[in-house]
Image: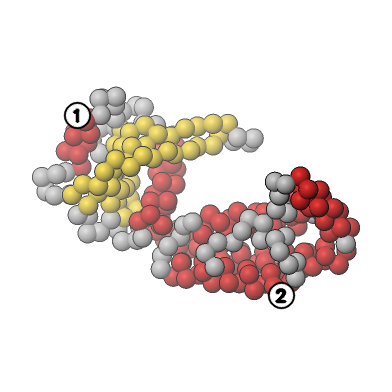
Amino acid sequence: MEKLSKDWLTQGLIDFEYKKYVLLAYLQTVKNSFVKGELYPFLADLVFHYRNLQALKENKALIRESFPKELSIEEFKKLELRYREIIEDDAVMNELESIINFALPQIMDSLKEGSIIYEYVESQCEISPVGVTPLYAKEGYLFVTQPPEKETNIYRYQMSIFEGSHEQLRSLNTQFIESVEKTTMNTYERLKLDLIKKFKDLPNPAAYLILARMKFPFAETLMPVAKRLFVKHISQPI
């Protein structure tokens, strides 16, 4: 099973054994991905499902909202009736509660496994500036590479800051530019100068190198971890 539907709890047959089978099949897929060192998209999915189930456990009224919505007015009316039947059916609600209580620790175990891998990958990444870093560093270039360091992926980045309900939230947008061969002549400083010549709208850009000491699956692991690590790095007060 590649994906666990966001409505998996209330989708189809509401039966403990069936939902247990669906969940465990999904978590086995997650485990197989983690064994290969591939964290995403499953780590983010696990976080979503855990938070969703926790919210449902704390507020059973949310169960109503978790049912799949139909576009047809006639179907919608049928679903509304079905919602009322389910919410008022103690046996079904007890079944859902049993499924939630089983699923939460199972998903948490997978989350812990993924978090250990995440922290290890993060510990193997180093961030260093390329050349002189300007005072404005919320926009610039990222060089991301890993052993044997023969190829470097170059991204243009822009970090946005917006106010959340309790704190400032940061979002990093990256745009892939190109992959270049790394040689003794083609240094990171040289690459930065080439970018300045090529893209005139950033005459004095910030540039950072993110270097992994070990090789990881690039799109599924290294790049997502590197982006989050970079947000923490650039958000630190000078």
Instruction: Quickly name the residue at label 1.
Output: 197
| Depicted 215 relative to depicted 193: above or below | below
Residue 151's spot in the image, x, y percent?
22, 52
Q: Which residue type does callout 2 highlight?
A: Glu
Q: Nearer the viewer, residue 94 or 117?
A: 94
**Quadrant of the image occupied by residue 7:** bottom right
Q: Nearer the viewer, residue 18 or 186?
A: 18
State the CA–CA distance, disc 2 to disc 1: 62 Å
Residue 58's spot in the image, x, y percent?
77, 54
Which residue is pictured at 25% across the width and 29% down the height?
A: 199
Q: Nearer the viewer, residue 67 or 136?
A: 67
Q: How is the image coloured?
A: secondary structure
Mark number displayed over residue 17: 2
Which of label 2 and label 1 is nearer to you? 2
Horizontally, is 37 left or right of 69 in the view?
A: left
Disc 2 or 1, which lies upstream in sequence?
2
| Depicted 91 relative to depicted 192: above or below | below
**Quadrant of the image occupied by residue 139:** top left
Q: Nearer the viewer, residue 144 or 233?
A: 144
Q: Which residue type does callout 1 highlight?
A: Lys
Q: Determine the secondary structure under disc 1.
A: helix
Which residue is pictured at 71% across the width and 64% down the height?
A: 12
Which residue is pictured at 72% across the width and 60% down the height?
A: 10
